Amino acid sequence: MDKAQRKAILNQAFSPTQPIQEKDFFFGRMNQLMKVIDAINEKGQHAILYGERGVGKTSLANIMYKSYTNIYPVKITCDRRHTFRSLWEDAFDKIQYSQTTNGIGFNAQNKSKMVSMKSLISSYTDLKTNQIVDILNNLGNDYKLMFIFDEFDNIDDLNTKYFFADLLKSLSDNNINTTVILVGIAESVEDLIGSHQSLERCLKQVKMPRMKKEECEEIIVNGLKLLDIKIDKIIQEKIIEFSSGFPHYIHLLCKYGCLELIENDKTYFSEPYLNIAINKGIENTSEQLRITFRAAILSSSNNGKWKNILYACANSELDEFNSFTTSDIVKEYNKITQKASNNSNLHYCINELTKKNRAEILTKLGKGRSSRYTFKNPMMRAFIKLKMNAK
């Protein structure tokens, strides 16, 4: 491969700014993918894919959209302007079929033209869920459709969420040729579509957690293999540690490290290239993360202390809710500073990080001694690790 070819592969193998589009470059998340496939193969079942920002939900949605040969897929990206009607107008507009009309006069030939399914709902002034079901049923059982509504968390209209809940239940009971998949940022299914106990039977709930170490390794190993690049095992472990389970940061560090290697006609990913990747990664990450970090550490006398506290938060062991305690922070802080601080010494500073003057970088959960903390933006954890390890 020449340099241009390797760069072209690099942009597909490691994509920190855009979700993965092609299945040949999609690694990890097989467990979640198989759960969604099970829902698609089960008559009357639909799926909801949810989790934190940056864990790869849209990439998985893209792979589902492009991977099936026996299903007609439609993918819609939701925004705040969407209503129940406009979402289905956009979805049906992507499905076209042939419409034949009889010619006029003797020996006139029939005429055919392509029209979109959107025309089938144009006559309804007040679109109802049963009308969507009827339209889909009229297609017959020879056609199997899959509708993916990505970024469903952008939907502000509560009625739209209620209508979708009702539609999923109705489709499950009355239709066998359609699967609906909702994808969005949420801590729970209720956060995304509301509390509807009647959906439990027909809705496959698939949570996208942060990536496991093995999944991170799969992205790195397979991506570098495509580029004929080897990596130092210690550097691979550091990339995984810095990423904190977010595929975005795996892609970010690998892309900029490999780009430097390709530019210099090198094939071994060692520490100097990781240092370059970290610095370029920080430059090319979210501006909002950089602004929030600066606001959190701003001090007239001692920026270093605030940096160390944030780094201690980023290194703290997480529980099942991705949160940590004051004791966890103090333990890590003492490792970093080689001091012997206690909870009372740092309590004020930790509490300040939950306030507006420190950009509310932390969110406090609970009260008193049982209180715990989590990053308001979960991707901040990885960003802080990169900032503190930049050289």
Image (cartoon, rainbow, N blue to C red):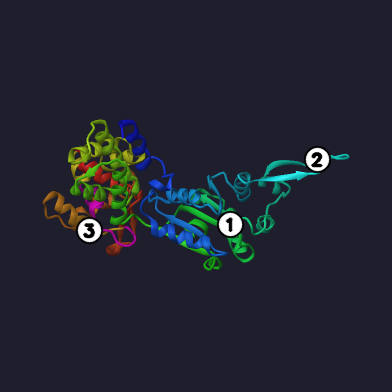
Cα–Cα gap, marks 1 and 2? 43 Å
Looking at the picture, how far across and down is residue 38, in whole percent? Answer: 48, 63
Q: Is residue 313 magenta?
A: yes
Image-quadrant location for residue 138? bottom right
**Residue 140 showing in the rendered view:** yes
Looking at the picture, how far across and down is residue 194, in whole percent? Answer: 52, 60
Numbered disc 1: secondary structure: helix
- Is label 1 or label 2 in front? 2
Mark 3 surroundings: few (<14), some (14-19) or many (≥20) residues within 10 A: some
Cα–Cα gap, marks 2 and 3? 79 Å
**Residue 15 showing in the rendered view:** no
Query: Which three-letter amino acid code belongs to the residue tagged 3?
Result: Asp
Q: Residue at x 24, y 35 (%)?
A: 261
Mark 1 surroundings: few (<14), some (14-19) or many (≥20) residues within 10 A: some
Please tell me the numbered disc located at residue 328: 3
Q: Earlier in the sequence, mark 1 or mark 2?
A: 2
The residue labelled by disc 2 is 109
Numbered disc 3: secondary structure: helix
Query: Which three-letter amino acid code belongs to the residue tagged 1?
Result: Phe
The residue labelled by disc 1 is 164
Q: Residue at x 63, y 49 (%)?
A: 85
Highlighted magenta segment, given as a residue range: 308-322
36 relative to 381, above or below: below
Mark 2 surroundings: few (<14), some (14-19) or many (≥20) residues within 10 A: few
